[in-house]
Image: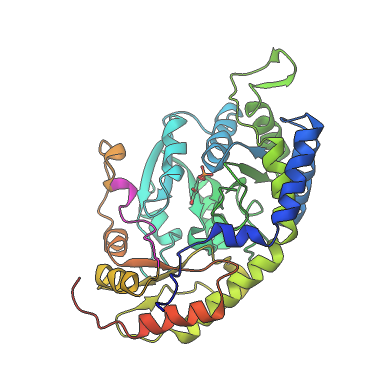
Amino acid sequence: MADPQIPFLDLKRVLSFQRDALVEAATRVIDGGMFVLGENLAAFETRFARLCGVDAVIGVGNGLDALRLTLRAAIDGGRLARGDEVILPAHTFIATALAVSDCGLVPVFADCDPHTALAGVAEFDACRTPHTRAAIAVHLYGQLCEMPALQAWCAQHELLLFEDAAQAHGASLDGLQPGRFGLAAAYSFFPTKNLGALGDAGGVATCDPALAEQVRRLRNYGSTEKYIHTERGLNSRLDELQAALLLVRLQRFEAELAERRRLAARYREGLHHPLLQPLALRTDKPESHAWHLFVVRSPRRDALQAWLAGHGIGSQIHYPRPIHRQDAYRDTATRPLPHTEALCGEILSLPLFPGLTDAEQDRVIEACNAFPGQAG
Ligand SMILES: Cc1ncc(COP(=O)(O)O)c(C=O)c1O
């Protein structure tokens, strides 16, 4: 009998551990008859804020809106103005850039470190101009950026610092998590994320009370009192059903994070191949990485992906085309970003999710180590 396939990610398996509790939570919401801005959202916001060690979490419709509403709040609060330049890495999911341009700010794309794939002070400073007013640190793949250094750099140049923590739930540096370094951190609870809902959901984590209040109003039509609108807001609320499901998912969050770290350590221990290199760790502190994705780099990436597929192993590329090369941003002038462009042709994400068995992971490791390295 042929070996079973090993999926890149099996959400049915991830959720199977909590299926009964999820069904119960959904039933409670249906029977309760309250679907927007209710007690489940309030409870989730409180618990996730506690988990992140921040003063406030505001649940919104998705991760893109978490970024968008954060930037809008900074504009409405007079801390940013339309037309200001905001530096962000080109090697991230497009949502980071969409939030910037949607707010009438100007995205300036930075290169990344070729070893970690993260952008830090060196890359951001190369993009700084007299019009720069803010920077967005993206904790890509779950690994935290060099936040103390970025904080110092932002303070030196009077820039606002924001965080895109869509992939970094639970990662910390010296006991601090996203939302404690920048003015605010945007989280996504898209189903594939380390803390995933069963649909779209997002959150803004912050210790800035003015920004928290502003985001709270903006997500709800610019209103705190029914039919009274102090500003032109949006409709972007994390709904009761998703909040109730997220409260259930939170119960396993720490265990799943520990499992991600265990699986990542097994990959790092087991992978040995001259043409395949796991991305580097920025620090030797295991808590600074939440291992949303396990990414290797290979000059023969396409052949490696085909080889794994031939062995029934799923893999994905995060991301195959950097943002400055997307048609959506063809009108945005960009400096050359050699590390980003090289990386996009060489990275591959291997299966890593809670529920992946050691036997399955061993098969992935064996297949990788046996990669013949021929052109694909
Ligand atoms: C780095 C990053 N930023 C932002 C987002 C946007 O989140 P969402 O899909 O919830 O809008 C995502 C996830 O998709 C992401 O990976």
Q: Is residue 104 above or below residue 318?
A: above
Residue 315: give x, y in percent of width and height: 39, 65
Q: Tell whether position 69 is magenta.
A: no
Whether residue 104 is visible? yes
Q: Nearer the viewer, residue 177 or 146?
A: 177
Q: On the rendered structure, is 141 left or right of 66?
A: left
* Residue located 44% across and 81% down the image: 363
Q: Quadrant of the N terminus?
A: bottom left
Q: Is residue 280 above or below residue 343?
A: below
Q: Quadrant of residue 241?
A: top right
Q: Tell whether position 322 is magenta.
A: yes
Residue 300: give x, y in percent of width and height: 25, 73
Q: Nearer the viewer, residue 64 or 313?
A: 313
Q: Quadrant of residue 58?
A: top right
Scheme by which the image is coloured: rainbow
* Residue located 43% across and 70% down the image: 5
* Residue located 69% across and 61% down the image: 253
Magenta region, main secondary structure: loop
Spot the residue most to the left. 375
Residue 225: give x, y in percent of width and height: 76, 18
What is the magenta range? 314-324
Whether residue 145 is visible? no
Q: On the rendered structure, is 196 left or right of 321?
A: right
Q: Nearer the viewer, residue 287 or 334?
A: 287
Q: Quadrant of the C terminus?
A: bottom left
